[in-house]
Image: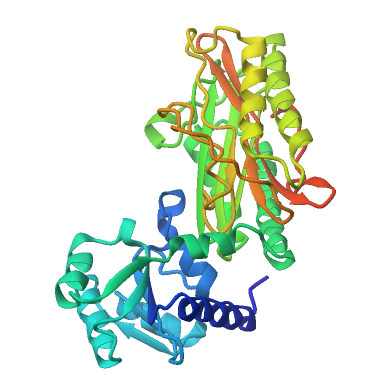
Amino acid sequence: MKLDRSVLRSRVAEVEKLVADEGLAALMVYATGSALGPSSRTHGYMRYLCDWDSHHAPSVLILRPGSAPTLLVPNIFMVFLANQYFWIEDVRFVKVPDFAREAVSMLTQSGLARARIGLVGRNEMPTPVWEGLKDHLPHVDWKDFTPALDARRVVKDPLQIAMHACAAEICDEMFATLGREIRAPKPAYQLQADMERTARYAGCECCMTWLTVMPKADYSRFFKEECSRVPQAGDQVFAGIYIIYEGHWGHAIRGGTFGTPTDTHRHLFDIALEMEDAMLALLRPGTDLNELQSVAEKIVFKHYPRADEEKVFRFRHGHGLGLSYEDPISSTPFPQLYDAPPKERVPVEAQAGMLFEFHPNLFVPGVGGAVIGDMVTVTADGPRILNQFPRELITW
């Protein structure tokens, strides 16, 4: 499945009209590629506007209403890639230190040296690029255009949901791969490689996993030095998946036991499932999304009234998902529980077409952990889970 170019041309035309309506002469978007995975907050804007992926490098898109779009890429091989597979015709090879020089030249030639220009990606833009823009275009009034694009990305259309459903299916295949491969005695990092091969084979441009294999699960383990344990009978086994498929994120988590689970493992999983079911029950158009994180936390404290004193670790119980791992606006109601609490709770209303990753979780020191994660979209009638892999305590 791929986005038709007509969809992208339509998006660009609509955004260019919005740029003009806000009194801006142009829009400049700085973005990193998919190789940064969940660490990039800018990649999703580039995929939304033109579906370009610069993979391990950054790129710049310049839109000037009435003129053809221009893309700046810092690698000559990306020009070859773009010429064969990309729809924008004006693609220029410009090294990152020269991004500002090329942009200044374009905007000056277009008579925009004293204009109001929209900007996206300032938070990830290298200092020399930003300083070059300011120094050589001192009279330009730069306006943060991020909020305008954020508002357009909150609700997904049926085509976008279908793309995410493809990503969810790949996640399911990766869990099935783990179920097959875990019987061979091999360390967790090799099991991660097996899962990631499934994703790459299915066409994902980015894949990252965590795999916790411990008698008492303690946290999400990502890296080789912490993923060397060979599964033993009675171990808890939790698998977390992060993939990008044609620009659209897939994210899911499943957990269980290698062999027969103990009563403690079952009890912990039942808590996590109770949390997710409570979040799902609340998810309707019009719901304040802040309630979802709150209801999950209430269940933690129902079972562990002294959770904070006992240092029961939790990461946030969900977030928005889309062309970014943390889609803007819809992720705000899900702050990380280990961060300082937000100064005020801003209401965010659920809307049909929103997409989330729900992953309620808890890790109890000396006891073990539990987590379950699903991709969930909002419909007029309530939630729809995109993943099909069983929502149960897995006997791996």
194 or 351: which is nearer to us?
A: 351
Question: Is 225 on the left-hand or right-hand side of 147?
Answer: left
Quadrant that contains the C terminus = top right
Question: Is 32 on the left-hand or right-hand side of 346?
Answer: left
Residue 153 higher or lower than 366, as above or below: below
Residue 83 higher or lower than 169, as above or below: below
- Residue 111 at what x, y percent from top left? 28, 91
| Total numbered labels placed on residues in the image | 0
394 or 351: which is nearer to us?
A: 351
* Residue 359 in which image quadrant: top right
Q: Residue furthest left?
A: 135
- Residue 247 at what x, y percent from top left? 55, 64
Quadrant that contains the N terminus = bottom right
Q: Residue furthest right?
A: 381
Residue 183 seen in the current view: no
* Residue 65 in which image quadrant: bottom left
- Residue 79 at what x, y percent from top left? 37, 83
Residue 73 seen in the current view: yes
Q: Residue at x 17, y 66 (%)?
A: 131
Q: Residue at x 32, y 56 (%)?
A: 123
- Residue 201 at what x, y percent from top left? 59, 60
Question: Is 332 on the left-hand or right-hand side of 250?
Answer: left
Colouring rule applied to residues: rainbow
Residue 41 higher or lower than 22, as above or below: above
Residue 118 higher or lower than 213, as above or below: below
Q: Residue at x 74, y 40 (%)?
A: 283
Q: Residue at x 56, y 10 (%)?
A: 367
